[in-house]
Amino acid sequence: MFRDVLRAVCAQELGHRIVGEADDGLRAVDMLLAAKPDLLLLDLRLPSLDGLDVLARVRPALPKLRTIVLSSRCDRFTLLSVERAQVQGFVDKNTNTFATLKEAVMAVRSGRTWFSAEYQRERAARLADSESFEKILRDRECEALAIIGAPHTIPEAARRLGISAAGVEKQRARLLQKLGLETTAELVRYAQENGFTRSSSSGDGGRLQP
C-alpha cells in the first residue's frame, strides 16, 4: 500500500515514469541494474539485503544514480551511515508528509539535495558531541558493536566477525572501556539506543503523513 502511494505521488502528481519496483534488497539490485533509473527512492530496511548495501552494490554500474532514502529510523548510527553513503536526500517517515516527499523529489531531480529537519538537527548534534561514537570507535569496532550488542552468542559473534571466541571477549572489553561502560547489559542498551542493532530483515513500514 505504501509503494502504491509513492507510485501515485511520483507518476500522477510529479509526472515521472516509474521504471521498476522491488520488495526486497536482492530483487532491488537486479531491478536497478536492468532498469538504470535516474532517481531511486530507497527504503533502508528491506528483506534479504539492507538498503545501503543495495546502493553499494549498484553504484559502480550506476555512478550517476541519484538517491533519496526513506526511513523511520533517525538514530545516530543510521544517519551517519546515510551520510557516508553520499545520497542526495533523506526523508523521515515519522515526521515528514507526502508534500515534503514531493519537495524532496523535485529538489533531487533538479540537481540539488534535500535532507529532513530531523536529519540536519541530529547531524549538527553529532558533530558538536565530542563523545559521539564515531569520534571514539574505529569502523571495525562499530562493526563489532553491532554484532556483540545484538546480542549474539559468543560463537555466533565470533563467526560473524571472523575472529576467535577469545577475540570477541577482547573486543567486548575494549568497547566497554572506550565507551565508559561497565556491563554487557549497558553495552547492549548503548547499541540499541544508537541504532547499531537495527534489523534489516523486515520492512521499515509506511508512516509518511498524508
Image: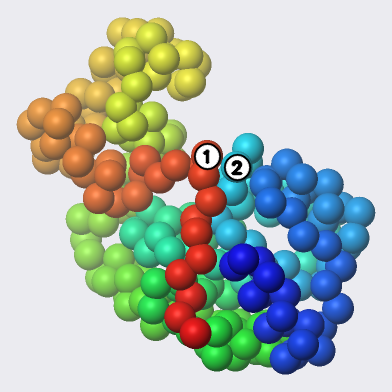
Kindly indicate whether the residue at mark 2 contacts the one at mark 1 (C-beta within 8 angstroms).
Answer: yes
Residue 42, position in %: x, y? 64, 62
- Horizontal side of residue 205 vs 131, given as left or right: right
Residue 102 shows up from this direction: yes
- Horizontal side of residue 5 vs 16, given as left or right: left
Residue 155, position in %: x, y? 38, 9
Q: Residues within 10 Å of mark 2 (few under 14, many from 20)?
A: some
Label 2: which secondary element: loop
User: What whole-number distance in Å separates the C-alpha atoms at marks 1 and 2?
Assistant: 5 Å
Amino acid at pointer 1: Ser
Query: Mark 1 or mark 2: which comes first in sequence?
Result: 2
Q: Which residue is mark 1?
A: 201
Residue 109, position in %: x, y? 74, 84
Residue 18, position in %: x, y? 83, 72
Q: Nearer the viewer, residue 101 or 182?
A: 101
Q: Which residue is mark 2?
A: 47
Amino acid at pointer 2: Pro
Residue sticking out furthest to the right = 34
The label shown at residue 89 is: none
Name the quadrant of the N terminus: bottom right
